[in-house]
Image (cartoon, coloured by chain):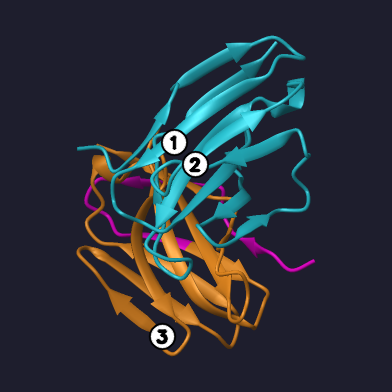
Chain colours: A cyan, B orange
Amino acid sequence: DTAVSQTPKYLVTQMGNDKSIKCEQNLGHDTMYWYKQDSKKFLKIMFSYNNKELIINETVPNRFSPKSPDKAHLNLHINSLELGDSAVYFCASSQSRAETQYFGPGTRLLVL
Amino acid sequence: GESVGLHLPTLSVQEGDNSIINCAYSNSASDYFIWYKQESGKGPQFIIDIRSNMDKRQGQRVTVLLNKTVKHLSLQIAATQPGDSAVYFCAERRAGGSYIPTFGRGTSLIVHP
């Protein structure tokens, strides 16, 4: 069984569109994250979220917003997509903020 | 600014050789370090971690060494196999911070059969 899953795996869209990426974890973890990985493989934290606290990387544009319907899900909504948003987005989860993170398989976003 | 970085972007080895991947960090407040492996098309996978009160930790075929004096971290892989080919990231976490690790740039390990 997949521990952390993301959908879709690939996403190709036009500039200006709004899109969402879904993430689900079946590990019973309390904390979930979103990372962006650029073309040079650099991993940058975007958000950290549990049922008590949302930590936002201040460099993330407010076009990006995490949405958590329940503890097992943390979706990423992106408004007004730009070319520079093209990257691989990884969801991760951990038992708590201090514990090891487990990553999903990634969503490859291409903005045309 | 403070950062986590790697000395070599690409490392090529022969199957069976030992591999050493290096990482430098600059924040002396970091107290926890993690190595991740990312295979092509997949997400990063935890390999091994080490806390700042240790200088060595061993796993299955992997050893992490921490030298706090020079702020250096290394990952040693024994008897490297083709399946070890991947990008390896070191990450550091700062005591008293948000607990979110900061990732380095990554080193691509290529294992030739």
| Residue A63 shows in this picture | yes
Query: As displayed, is residue A69 above or below residue B94?
Result: above
The residue where tag 1 is placed is: A23
The structure residue drawn at horizontal position 76% and vertical position 21%, both measured from the top left corner, is A80
Neighbor class of circle 2 (other Cα within 10 Å; few <14, some 14-19, many 20+) is many
Q: CA distance from mark 1 to mark 2?
A: 5 Å
Identify the image quadrant of the C terminus of chain B.
top left
Position of residue B33 measured from the top left corner of the image (x, y, whole percent): 48, 71
The residue where tag 3 is placed is: B55
Q: Nearer the viewer, residue B60 or B32?
A: B32
Neighbor class of circle 3 (other Cα within 10 Å; few <14, some 14-19, many 20+) is few
The disc, 1 or 2, on the residue closer to the chain's N-terminal end is 1
For the image shown, how many numbered marks are present on the structure?
3
The residue where tag 2 is placed is: A74
Position of residue B80 measured from the top left corner of the image (x, y, whole percent): 26, 52
The subunit letter for the residue under badge 3 reads B
| Same chain for the residues under marks 1 and 3 in the image | no
Q: CA distance from mark 1 to mark 3?
A: 36 Å
Q: CA distance from mark 2 to mark 3?
A: 36 Å
Please provide the residue range marked out in magenta.
Answer: B1-21
Position of residue A31 measured from the top left corner of the image (x, y, whole percent): 46, 57
Query: As displayed, is residue B77 above or below residue A61?
Result: below
The structure residue drawn at horizontal position 66% and vertical position 25%, both measured from the top left corner, is A86
Circles 1, 2 touching at the beta carbon (< 8 Å): yes
